[in-house]
């Protein structure tokens, strides 16, 4: 029963298409018909509405953060499953015929719930790479790779409490799975980068 609740709650939380909803309500725009067609914050930014883009980003982070934090508190044995299903909810939402976003903001929310240190590292890496290359896709893939490599080298997140250690340690295998999934969700971007047709972001 507990595992069923965790999987369902995590997936449904992750599946809420905030970018699509906000753009439709406040901009009268179907975000799937502009730019990359993605429902995430980067594509919302292409509408020219920075407020909607920032709001989408924060809500997409929250929908990854919330279910994992609930799971950490009440169902610590299922934390990694919660992480994966929250992410998969965003990428494959049932409401949009399983055609969702790239999952990067939701991934950041998940990582924030697991380790503030890794979340800061992700944001720092993303910003630096974005300033250099101007591509959101490159920043996202490189940042997720950085987290995996860093955590693999460090192996564990220091914690004085063994219970907290169990739920806060970001398993390198989990980060590897996320990196592979993020590469998968950016497969079109990789193709665009090869063809030099990838859209740059305006920071």
Image (tube, rainbow, N blue to C red):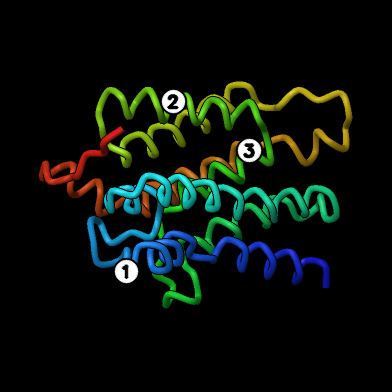
Residue 40 picture quarter: bottom left
Q: Is residue 198 left or right of residue 109?
A: left
**x, y percentage for residue 197?**
12, 46
Residue 152: x, y in percent?
58, 28
Residue 75 position, x and y percent, is 83, 55
| Residue designated by label 1 | 30
Closer-to-camera residue (187/198): 198
Residue 151, image x, y percentages: 59, 28
Residue at the image point whose x is 70% and y is 56% from the top: 67
On residue 128, which mark appears? none
Query: Residue 105, relative to residue 142: is it above or below?
Result: below
**Residue 132 in which image quadrant:** top left
Name the residue rendered at 41%, 63% in the picture. 26
Q: Is residue 182 above or below residue 28?
A: above
Of residue 190 and residue 139, the one placed in the foreground of this image is 139
Number of on-image labels: 3
Using the numbered discs, state the Cα–Cα distance from disc 3 to disc 2 in whole angstroms: 15 Å
Q: Which residue appears at 25% of the width and 28% of the height?
A: 133
Badge 3, how many Cα within 10 Å: few under 14, some, many 20+? many
Of badges 1 and 3, nearer the viewer stands: 1
Along the polypeptide, which appears first: circle 1 or circle 3?
1
Provide the secondary structure element on which disc 1 rests: loop
Left or right of 181 on screen, residue 65: right
Report the disc number at residue 125. Answer: 2
| Residue situated in front as seen by the camera: 129 or 144 | 129
* Residue at image mark 3: 112
Q: Is residue 187 above or below residue 194?
A: below
Q: What whole-number distance in Å separates the C-alpha atoms at marks 1 and 3?
A: 30 Å
């Amino acid at each position: 029963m507990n595992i069923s609740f965790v999987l369902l709650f995590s997936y449904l939380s992750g599946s809420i298409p905030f970018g699509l909803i906000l753009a439709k309500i406040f901009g009268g725009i179907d975000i799937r018909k502009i730019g990359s067609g993605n429902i995430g914050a980067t594509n919302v930014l292409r509408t020219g509405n920075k407020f909607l883009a920032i709001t989408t980003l924060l809500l997409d982070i929250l929908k990854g953060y919330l279910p994992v934090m609930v799971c950490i508190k009440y169902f610590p044995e299922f934390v990694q499953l919660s992480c994966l299903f929250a992410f998969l909810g965003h990428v494959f939402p049932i409401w949009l015929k399983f055609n969702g976003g790239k999952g990067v903001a939701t991934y950041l929310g998940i990582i924030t719930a697991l380790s503030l240190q890794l979340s800061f590292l992700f944001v720092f890496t993303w910003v630096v790479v974005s300033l250099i290359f101007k591509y959101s896709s490159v920043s996202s893939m490189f940042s997720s790779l950085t987290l995996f490599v860093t955590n693999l080298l460090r192996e564990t997140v220091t914690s004085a409490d063994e219970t907290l250690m169990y739920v806060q340690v970001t398993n390198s295998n989990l980060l590897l799975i996320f990196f592979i999934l993020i590469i998968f969700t950016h497969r079109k971007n990789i193709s665009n980068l090869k063809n030099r047709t990838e859209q740059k972001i305006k920071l």
